[in-house]
Amino acid sequence: MIEPIIVVTNNPMSKENLSSKYVTEFIDGSTIDVFKKVRSYIHNGHKLLTHPLMSSIKPNETPYRTVIISKNREKAVEVDSLKYIEEGISSTEKFTNKFGIPNWSEQVLEDFQLIDYDLIYHALY
C-alpha cells in the first residue's frame, strides 16, 4: 500500500501480524461488527481500500474479516466505499439469516484466520 492505512479486523492473526506496522483496530465481535465499524469510518471520510467480501468463502462461513481503509480522511463520504460496505453488510446478513453460522472446530477456525490473514497480506504486499 502506498498511502497510510488503518486495519480493521476481528482476526487475532491479522492483529498479531499487522499491528506493529499499521494502525490496527481489533473488533471483539462478528464480521458484521467489523463491517459496521468500517462503515462508521467511511461515514467520517475514510475510504475503503480492500473489498469487504474479498474471497470466495460465503460470508456466513468464515467468522473472520480484515478490511483496510485509508488513514487519511476526506471532507466528503466516498460513495463507492459506502456502497461496497453496505453490500457487504447486506450479503453477510442474508447468508447468516438463511444458512446460519457453522459451529467450527478450533482447527478450522485457525484455518479461517490464516486464510483471512493471507488474503490481506497479499493485498498489502
Image (cartoon, helix red, strand yellow):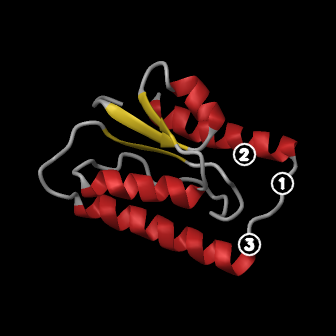
Q: Which mark is residue 36?
A: none
Looking at numbered disc 2 in the image, what kind of residue is underneath it?
Answer: Phe
- In depth, the one of 115 and 101 nearer the eye is 101
Q: Is residue 85 visible?
A: yes
Give the alpha-carbon distance from disc 2 to disc 1, as whole Å.
10 Å
Residue that numbered label 1 is attached to: 104
Looking at numbered disc 1 in the image, what kind of residue is underneath it?
Answer: Trp
- In depth, the one of 10 and 50 nearer the eye is 10
Write the residue at 84% across / 54% down: 104
How many neighbours does mark 2 have within 10 angstroms: few (below 14), some (14-19), or many (20 or more)?
A: many
Disc 2 versus disc 1: nearer the observer: 1
Q: Which mark is residue 100?
A: 3
Q: In the structure shown, which secondary structural element does the residue marked by tag 1 occupy?
A: loop
Mark found first going from the N terminus, 2 or 1: 1
Give the alpha-carbon distance from disc 3 to disc 2, as whole Å.
17 Å
Q: Position of residue 15 (x, y in %)?
A: 56, 31
Q: How many marks?
A: 3
Q: Position of residue 63 (x, y in %)?
A: 67, 54
Please determine whether, in this image, residue 123 is positioned above or below residue 45: above
Classify residue 70 by image quadrant: top left
> Is residue 105 found left or right of 66 in the rendered image?
right
How many neighbours does mark 1 have within 10 angstroms: few (below 14), some (14-19), or many (20 or more)?
A: few
Give the alpha-carbon distance from disc 3 to disc 1, as whole Å.
12 Å
Q: In the structure shown, which secondary structural element does the residue marked by tag 2 occupy?
A: helix
Q: In the structure shown, which secondary structural element does the residue marked by tag 3 occupy?
A: loop
Residue that numbered label 2 is attached to: 112
Q: Residue furthest bottom?
A: 98
Write the residue at 63% across / 58% down: 56
Q: Residue furthest left?
A: 75
Looking at numbered disc 3 in the image, what kind of residue is underneath it?
Answer: Gly
Q: Residue furthest front?
A: 28
